[in-house]
Amino acid sequence: MIKLSEIDSNYYYEGNDLGYSFNDDVHTFKVWSPLATEVKLCIYNHYDTKTNTTYKMEKNEVGVWQVFIREDINGKYYNFLVNIDGVNNEVVDPYARALSINGEKGAIIKIEQSNPEGWFDHKISKITKPTDACIYELHIRDLSIDNNSGIKNKGKFLGICQENTISNEGVKTGLSHIKDLGVTHVQLLPIFDYGSVDERKSSLMSEYENSNDYNWGYDPINYNAPEGSYSTNPYNPINRIKELKTAIKTLHENGLGVIMDVVYNHMLDVNKSSFDKLMPGYYFRYDEEGVLCNESGCGNAIASENKMVRKFIVDSVKFWATEYKLDGFRFDLMGLLDVQTMNEIKKELYKINPAIIILGEGWNMGNSLQDTEKAIQLNAYKLRDIAFFNDDIRDTLRGSYCDLKEKGFLNGANNLELKVKKGIVGGINYSNNIITWGEVEPNQVVNYIECHDNNTLYDRLKINEQDEDKIKYMSRLGMSIILLSQGIPFIHAGQEFLRTKYGVENSYKSNDSINKLDWKTKYNNMDTVKYCKGLIKLRKNCSAFRMETSEEIRQSLRFIAAPNNAVAYIIEKENSYGQFNKIIVIHNANTNSIKINTNINLDWKVVVNKYKSGIETLKVNSGSKFIIEGLETLVAYN
């Protein structure tokens, strides 16, 4: 019997052809299972038939089983029947790129048939530097499911594609809204095949369907094929692929990059996973007593440090990047993956697209790996050009995620100015007082105040503040800090119009009435939408807010004296206006007005105040002194 300790040294497979492929009229199937004593390929004529035709597979010296078929089996389905220790298990090919309903079988298709018209002609994102990006996080279903969205294919991939849609109140919805807002990238919550929604019911789901029919998708089953519930016909394996590609193509044609949220740190069910049936004890982490590690909080953790596990993750990401023309990847619980795996992913992705964006959650969780091996914030210096979510600025602005009643900089907490400054300089080692995760660059820090996890910003502020006007201006203050700080800004869909989930903190399986983007809420908060839009426009038009290196930030940005609960700084840098400019930025979290003397006596053009933002001059402030209203961000330049 093979020892698990010998697997990496003796059974590593270097080939790039695992799974199903079709070339020169030959169907090739390969699967890695060194422990198996017999493997058969099972071919099904239909996705729900029980009978199958079996083909014996041959094993090579490193445990790869293979079979070559010259019959016409296109359009049929397949699984592997694996015998280990006398026990037979039928498994889905972990490399399967097309699937039957609910991912129960692999589908045999010519994947080029899934390409929409013009697929090879369209261009990917034009953004070449991560700090030029502005990321918009979106759940496929949330965007269009509201009856007021004006979108035909509600809750589907194709719902992203419909242009020029408006609500009953006449405001832009869906793709038109995203495009109008001015963001550069749409980050899609998991779009691979996940297990918490029955694809058979998906076409019947109404707006207020039972909560069990909704999920964010952080429960993987099959990594290399799209989720069927987002397809108009989940029974057709080609359809779901083609519709996702159509959505990506449409976003690209509208000037938007596409980032895929990937979950390689855990799976829905280890006992049902193909990995565990093909190679028990290898793909997941176990403690000293042989119990599955629960580092992810989802019952298991994938052992990325094992060579064939690492290979699968790298192969999977490369496949998505090439086949689907993606512009970036967001790694869920990236801290559970190891440094070597993430660097290997980066190396391979940069061969495909040097401008691809890689970001993830660098939380330090579990102890299966040594801290020095983990892809966590403190190891950012080992993971150059990979970005980490900055939970420091999130908690500083709104309060700790652990204590919902704790206040932040926006709503009355004191002595947080230094922490705000750390976020403003993009998490770099700016000075002796401002030191964060080590020697990082601004392209490694993702600043955010709201995401799919935890309360929306509006709901969080609502816990401690009932005055709607104050909540509005606190929200604007928070958005301005995020969008004008160095690093990569990140917005949660609907944040720009004070999205509420009615106090539901973790809405991963709540129904549509909680999770949908409510377009009437946008109508009611159009002034804040325009404010957010103006901030994005200012960032795009002024390179001083998106510097590329830590040295550039240190040379160009300096903080000046400000009252308690306020932060002020000046940037002196040649920017996109084509002249050497001085830019003053003041964030006042007090509810009362404050005065600040810049000691620079000039005519300052104000472009952002409490009520409006953008690149147009709102007024001219002559002299060195400014009065800043309560809960206001002021930006002016000379």
Image: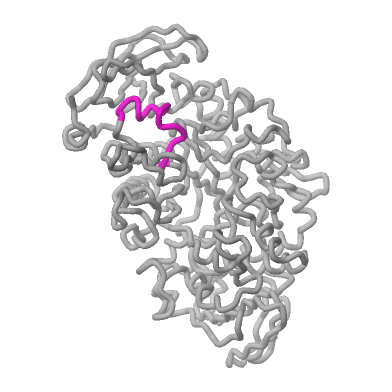
Residue at image position (69%, 42%) is: 163
Q: Is residue 278 magenta?
A: yes
Secondary structure predominantly adopted by residues drawn in magenta: loop
Farthest front residue?
A: 289
- The residue lying toward the viewer, choosing from 140 and 465, is 465
**Figure quadrant of residue 244:** top right
The quarter of the image holding the C terminus is bottom right
- The residue lying toward the viewer, choosing from 219 and 428, is 219
Q: Is residue 527 magenta?
A: no
In the rendered image of this protein, does residue 142 appear above or below residue 232? below
Counting the numbered discs, the total is 0
In the rendered image of this protein, does residue 361 appear above or below residue 235? below
**Figure quadrant of residue 74:** top left
Q: How is the image coloured?
A: one colour
In the rendered image of this protein, does residue 92 appear above or below residue 184? above
The quarter of the image holding the N terminus is top left
Farthest right residue?
A: 169
Residue 160 visible in the picture: no
Q: Which residues are magenta?
A: 264-280
Residue 468 visible in the picture: yes
Residue 377 x %, y % = 39, 60
Residue at image position (34%, 21%) is: 23
Residue 387 x %, y % = 43, 57
Residue at image position (59%, 69%) is: 481
Q: Taking 256 as reference, is 588 left or right?
A: right
Residue at image position (77%, 45%) is: 166
Q: Taking 334 as reference, is 467 left or right?
A: right
Residue 494 x %, y % = 67, 53
Residue 308 x %, y % = 28, 36
